[in-house]
Amino acid sequence: MSIPQQSLFASDPGTARRRAAEARFRAYGLGAVLVGVAALLLLLSSVLSSGLGAFWQTRIHIPVTLAGAALDPLGGRDPAAMRKVTTIAYGKVIEAALRDAIAQAGIELPLTDAEIAAMLSKEAPAQLRNKVLADPALVDGTIEVSLLANGRIDGYLKGRVTMDSAQLDRNVTPQQLLLADRMLARGMLSRDLNPGFLTAPDASDLRPEAAGLGVAILGSAYMMLIVLGLALPIGVASSIYLEEFAPRNRWTDLIEVNIANLAAVPSIVFGVLGLAIFINFAGLPQSAPIVGGLVLTLMTLPTIIIATRAALKSVPPSIRDAALGVGASRMQAVFHHVLPLAAPGILTGAIIGLAQALGETAPLLLIGMVAFVREFPAAPPEGFFDPAPALPAQIYNWTQRADPAFVERAWGAIIVLLGFLLVMNAAAILLRRRFERRW
Amino acid sequence: MSCIRQTASILAILAVSAGAAAARDQVQVAGSSTVLPYATIVAEIFGESAGFPTPVVESGGSSAGLKKFCEGVGENTVDIANASRRIKDSEIEACRAAGVADIIEVQFGYDGIVFASDIGGNAFAFTPADWYRGLAAQVIVDGKLVTNPATSWDQVNPDLPAQPIMAFIPGTKHGTREVFDLNVIERGCKDSGAEQALAALVGDDAAKTCTTLRTDGRAVEIDGDYTETLSRIDSNKEGIGVFGLSFYENNASKLQVATMNGVTPSTETIASGEYPVSRPLFFYVKKAHIGVIPGLKDYAELFVSDEIAGPGGPLAEYGLVPDPELAKAQAVVADETALD
C-alpha cells in the first residue's frame, strides 16, 4: 500500500469538500436561527405597537359641582337612599359641567349640546356616581374630576381616528376633534396611564374606553389556583407511586402509554368532556372558574406527571440504596431523600404546565368562559362558582367586537397574557438553574 | 388512564358537594352573536342602575343559544336566549320535552343587512337581481341552464362598474345567511324573471337552483364574524362584503355602503321598510325562572323600554332599527305572555 505524496499544507479534494459541507451546514443553521429570531421580533413588535396604546387612556379634567337637589333629593346623605339616583341624573350634571368648563375656557366652536356630551364616555356618569356614593359628603361641593373621554376622542389622540375618517364616521364629527385639540392645549384633556385596563371589568360595545381586564385576570387566577391545588398533588402522588412503588407489569405499561397519549390529546377534547361531565352531568354552574379549573386540571395532569417522573428518574439509584441501606423504609427514602432532590424538576414541570393552561382557549369556548361578565367574583372559595371569563377568552371576545377601539384592547390583553407567561417561564428557568443538582 | 378517570370522577363528586351551596343571583343570557352587543349594552345599564348584579351574556349563535335554553328548568340553565331568527317548531318541542313549557317571545327591533366595499373603491347601486345573476351557480343563457359565466359586475348589469365579482357572504351556520338567501338571492331570482324560466326548465327544483351559489371562488363563505369579512376586504380591495348595519356604522371610515333598489340603508329606511334586507331580532325568556332568578323580569322590561330600545336610545345609537311596534313587546313582557 502506497501513501500518496501530498503536502500537509494544501488540503486534498476530499477534505475541502468536507470542510465546505460543514461551512454550508453552519450557514443553514445560522439562517434557521435568524429566521426564528426575525419571526419572533416581528411578532413582538406587531403586538407591542398595536397593543401598548391600551395602557394609556384619554381623560377629561373638569370641575363638577355636585348639586344636592339632583343627586340627593332626600337630603339625608344616606348612601342607601342616594343609590336610587341613577346614572342618568349624574350624566346631566356632568354634561352641564363640561359645557360650563368649555365656555369658561373661552373655546368657541359650533357644537351642539349632544356633541359636547358625546366627548365624554358613557361610563363617566357611573364613575362619578361611584365616587359620590363612596363619599356622600362630596355632595353640594365642587370637585375636580378626571372622567374618561369617548373612545373616538381617545382614538384621535392615539392616531386611530383622523379628521378624514371623522368626516365619514357617524360616531364622531370633525368639530369634536377640533374641540379635543383646544381642550388638549388648555390641559383639560390629557392622555394618562390607564390602570383601569388591568383592574376594570369588561364593558359593552358602546364604551370601549372603559373596558378592562380585571374580572378576566381574576378568573384566570382562580382557575390557576384550582389547577395548582388539584393537578400538583394528584400528579406528584401518581408519579411517585408509578415510579417508586408500582410493580412493573402490563398494567403499569398500559397506564404509562395512556398518560403519554393523554398529553397529546387536543385540548378542545377536554372542553367537550368538561361540558358533558362537569356541567351537564354534575350540574356545576356555567362560565365559572371551577369548571374551567377542573377542565384545565385534566389537561395539565399528564404534563405534570411526565415532568415529575422524569425528575424522579434523574435522582440516582445510589441515593435510594444508601437510604435503604441505613435502615430507612421505602417511604422514608422517597420522602426524605428522593423527593427533595427531585423538587426543582417537579416545580419546573408544574409551572410550565400552568403556563400552558393559562394560555389555553379552546376548551374554555365550550364551557361558557367566553361571556360578558361585569361583576367581580367573590373571594375564594365561593368565588370559584361565580361567573368570570379567562384572559385568553377575553382576548377572543374582544377581537369580535365591531368597534375598532376593541382591537387595540385585544392586543393590549395579549401583552398582559404574554407578560404573565414570561414571568412564569422565567420562574421555571430560575428554579431549575438555582436548585437543580447534576450527578 | 384508569387513574385519570378515577381522579376525574372524584373531582366531579367533590365539586358537586361544594357546588350545592352556591345559588345564582344574576341573570344568565346566551345566544346570537348579532344580538350580543345589544344584550351587553342593556346588561351594563341594568347592572349600573337597577340594583341587581350585571347579567352574564354569552354568545355562540342563535341555534346554540336556543339549545342551551331548552336544556331544562333550573339554576344551571340559562334564563334568556337571544336569537336573530324566530324559534323553530322543532326547538319549541325540544324545549317542552325538557320541561321548558312556557317560553316568552320578545321581538325588540330589526337588524339591517348591508353590502359594503372598500372606501377607496367603486360605488355600487345594486338590485337583488344583480346579486342573483352574479352569484348563482347556474343561470339561464339563451334558454339553456349553464354554469354562471359572469366574471365582473358590469356583465350582470351594464350600470355597475367593471369590477371582478368577489363577494364575501356569511357562512351557512349564520342566521344572516338565511336572510341573505331569502331577501336577496331568491328575491333577485324572482325579480329577474329567472324563477319562471327555471320552473319551465327544471320543474320543482327551481327554488333550489335559485339559491345554489357558485363555488368557483367568487362567492366566499365567511364562517367567522364581520371582523373577518372586514379584514378580507382590507386585503382584497375589490371584494364586496355582507355586514350588519351596526358593524358597518362602527367602521364607516373603512367601508362604503352600496344601495339596494336605490335605497341607502339606515335605521330610518329599514324601519320604514324601504330598504329590503332586514330581519327581526328576538329574545326568549323562560317563564318558569321569573320570580326565581332575581331581576329577570326587570331586565326584560328594561330591554324593551322606550328609553333603551326606542328611537334615540342607546340600542338605536349602536345600530338597532327600533321596532315601530315596541309597545307590543312591552305588553308581552308585562303580561308574561307565553307562546302557545
Image (cartoon, coloured by chain):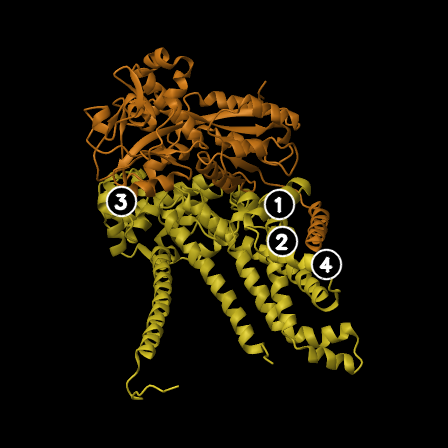
Q: Is residue A201 something one can see in this rendering?
A: no
Q: Vertically, is A324 above or below B216? A: below
The residue positioned farthest toward the front in the image shown = A1
Q: Vertically, is A224 above or below A330? A: above
The residue to which callout 3 is attached is: A176
Displayed quadrant of residue B279: top left
The image shows residue B295 at horizontal and vertical percentages of 58, 35
The amino acid type, in three-letter code, at marker 4 is Arg
Report the front residue among B107 and A57. B107
Q: Are marks 2 and 1 in contact (CB under 8 Å)?
A: yes
Q: Are marks 4 and 2 on the same chain?
A: yes
Give the yellow chain's letter: A
Ranked by sequence position, the earlier of labels 4 and 1 is 4
Residue A273 is marked as: 1
The amino acid type, in three-letter code, at marker 2 is Leu
Q: In which quarter of the image is the C terminus of chain B?
A: top right
Q: Do labels 4 and 1 share a chain?
A: yes
Ranked by sequence position, the earlier of labels 2 and 1 is 1
The amino acid type, in three-letter code, at marker 1 is Leu
The image shows residue A37 at horizontal and vertical percentages of 37, 65
The residue to which callout 2 is attached is: A298
Q: Mark 3 lies on which chain?
A: A
Residue at 64% x, 32% y: name it.
B72
Q: What element carries label 2?
A: helix
